Amino acid sequence: MIEVEVSAQVHPTEDESRVHSAIEKIFPGLEYQSEERDGMTLRLVGRGGKDRLGSLHELLRSRKILDAARTNIHIEGNIVTFILNKQAATAGIVSFPADDEPLGSIWVEIRTNDDAVAQRIVDWLAPPTEHGLPLFEIEL
């Protein structure tokens, strides 16, 4: 079991459809839900399975940022987490900010039923490299 949850705050100055589009460029095909209060969208949440990670997998390789990805992806037991730059995502670019950004970041949480599966997800998304080339590629 692999469950993917991707979320981002939607600030009053932002258009919800643009935040949706930014997430969709990195994680196509998620099922979305808006969390609202007083008629305003506060957070957009997309959910899906492991098949929603394929685009991210390819983008990390095409942008040649496997090392940056591996550094910024965190594992805690059976949960894999990381954040992405929301503004870069609007252009379909994967970028890892140092911290949550003033207008918010895209938060990614991947839940598994096993700690070993969590490590396998990291190794599949961003394997260790040598001279910028993956030491191995595995199937997920």
Image: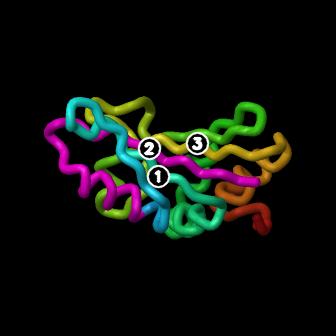
Residue with the mark numbered 2: 7
Crowdedness near tag 2: few (<14), some (14–19) or many (≥20) residues, C-alpha within 10 Å = many
Could you tell whether 129 is left or right of 108 in the image? Answer: right
Q: Which mark is residue 32?
A: none
Q: Does the magenta portion include 9? A: yes
Reading the chain from its start, which is encountered first: label 2 or label 1?
2
Residue at the (59%, 68%) spot, across then down: 54
Residue in the foreground of this view, choosing between 79 and 75: 79
Q: Amino acid at mark 1?
A: Gly
CA distance separating discs 2 and 1:
6 Å
Q: Amino acid at mark 2?
A: Ser
Residue with the mark numbered 1: 46
Residue with the mark numbered 3: 109
Is the Cβ of the residue at disc 2 closer than 8 Å to that at disc 1?
A: yes
Residue in the foreground of this view, choosing between 16 and 94: 16
Report the span colored magenta. 1-25
Q: Nearer the viewer, mark 1 or mark 3?
A: 1
| Callout 2: SS | strand
Q: Quadrant of residue 50?
A: bottom right
| Callout 3: SS | strand
CA distance separating discs 1 and 3:
11 Å
Is the Cβ of the residue at disc 1 closer than 8 Å to that at disc 3?
A: no
| Callout 1: SS | strand
Residue in the foreground of this view, choosing between 58 and 21: 21
Crowdedness near tag 1: few (<14), some (14–19) or many (≥20) residues, C-alpha within 10 Å = many
Reading the chain from its start, which is encountered first: label 2 or label 3?
2
Is the Cβ of the residue at disc 2 closer than 8 Å to that at disc 3?
A: yes
Residue in the foreground of this view, choosing between 91 and 39: 39
Q: Does the magenta portion include 19? A: yes
